[in-house]
Image (cartoon, coloured by chain):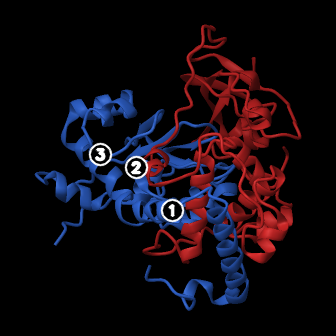
Amino acid sequence: MAHDHDHDHDHDHGSELSETQLRVRALETVLAEKGYIDPAALDAIIEAYETKIGPHVGARIIAKAWLDPEFKKALLADATKAIGTLGHISRVGDHLVAIENTPKTHNMVVCTLCSCYPWEMLGLPPVWYKAAPYRSRAVKDPRGVLSDFGVALPKDMEIRVWDSTAETRFIVVPMRPAGTEGWNEDQLTEIVTRDSMIGTGLPEAKRPA
Amino acid sequence: MNGVHDMGGMDGFGKVEVEKNEPPFHEPWEGRVLAMNRAMGATGIWNIDMSRHSRELLKPTTYLAATYYQKWFLGLRNMLLERGYIDADELEKGHALRPGKPLKRGPFGMKDVERVLNRAKFGRPTNTQPKFKTGDKVRCKNINPATHTRLPRYVRGHVGVVELNHGTHVFPDTVSIDGTENPQWLYTVVFTSQELWGADADPTIKISIDAFEPYLDPA
């Protein structure tokens, strides 16, 4: 991994983190010596999250839905099943629910109780998704939260917040932006951002170079 | 439990801070913690709700001050200590001092990696009939168990409408205590913002939770 102790993010808590690092290492050594885990298998899990599973997976599903009305219909009816029919494009868990943004309704997903997130579609949740400001405010002041993301929606647009309190997982199908007529699946995939599938962002028609 | 993890509707935490181009992990140890959690969970010695509850049980001051993966580390360590899979003196030394205990599904190795990258299944067919149908008005019960529950405080006592029926699922409130799956009907229930936050709330906002049938009364 490319991140070292001097990563900007950690300047304030350098010593605290290095203590955590030692404690984590001690725990892993104990677990390995007791024969509970193979550290190489941990490497493989980490590698999958660093290289294979990420928002590009969900973005391709959204691009397909924008291009193929039949697939979109199936996705909205049963996302787990619809994605399953695509073959080995990605792993998909049970009870994935795709929710569609329309000119009338904008959807936004949160987990107020912990960090439930469609990992298999979007990868690991970003820090802000798991942190108190988002978890506390998304259900009470979603417009305020959206403004933290630089998103301003029309005052009369309905905002629907989905609190992921069970093992159902939600992915937002954003509206396809104007100016993307004639784009192919790869081009559309490029503009579907992680935040647009959580509902804290909107895709923009910036033609990929 | 009425813990500080139940954050919906709290004020004072400030702006959402978005990091541009955030990496999957900020420090290598974060990845180790994530992977150890996945691996030990996959050995079958506890379930996902027990593991959530272990983080809810952290002191509120710790919960709020710790980073996400620090909470995951503390929860994992506590579960391993409480269940006797490791001992405090071993953590102190940084080495095993006693042999390991048997694990329900055996040690975690390369053959198990694919399994943990796929989400577990929580749907459990039952021969029961759902008490509610789409469009029904329901009131969330006022329950305050000291144990794990997935009914957030901000909806308790409030009336919403059943929008989706997701079938019958493992019930977190019992499976987190002793592993009893006790499958229950699960619904998406939607509330108006005024119902939850009062007459002054923005009327264009609606909020839903996924609620297990035992959380709900007809309204």
Report the disc number at residue A61. 3
| Figure quadrant of the C terminus of chain A | bottom left
Q: Amino acid at mark 3?
A: Ile
Q: Amino acid at mark 2?
A: Met
Q: Residue B142, image x and y in percent?
A: 85, 30
Tell me which numbered mark, 1 or 2, is placed earlier along the sequence: 1
Task: Give the mark toward the camera: 1 or 2.
Answer: 1
Chain A: what color? blue
Task: Give the mark toward the camera: 3 or 1.
Answer: 1
Q: What secondary structure is marked by label 1?
A: helix
Name the residue at 47% across, 66% down: A43
Q: Is residue A209 visible?
A: yes
Disc 3 and disc 2 on one polypeptide chain: yes
Dot 3 and dot 2 residues touching (CB under 8 Å): yes
Q: Name the outermost residue toward the left.
A: A182
Disc 1 and disc 2 on one polypeptide chain: yes
Q: What secondary structure is marked by label 3?
A: helix
Q: Amino acid at mark 1?
A: Leu
Q: How many marks?
A: 3
Dot 1 and dot 2 residues touching (CB under 8 Å): no
Residue bearing the label numbered 1: A42
Q: Find the distance from the CA under tag 3 to the CA under tag 2.
A: 9 Å
Q: Name the outermost residue toward the front.
A: B99
Q: Residue A62, image x and y in percent?
A: 30, 46
Chain name for mark 2: A
Looking at the colours in the rendered structure, which chain would you say is drawn in red? B
Tell me which numbered mark, 3 or 2, is placed earlier along the sequence: 3
Q: Find the distance from the CA under tag 3 to the CA under tag 1.
A: 28 Å
**Which is more toward the observer, A25 or B204?**
A25
| Figure quadrant of the N terminus of chain A | bottom left
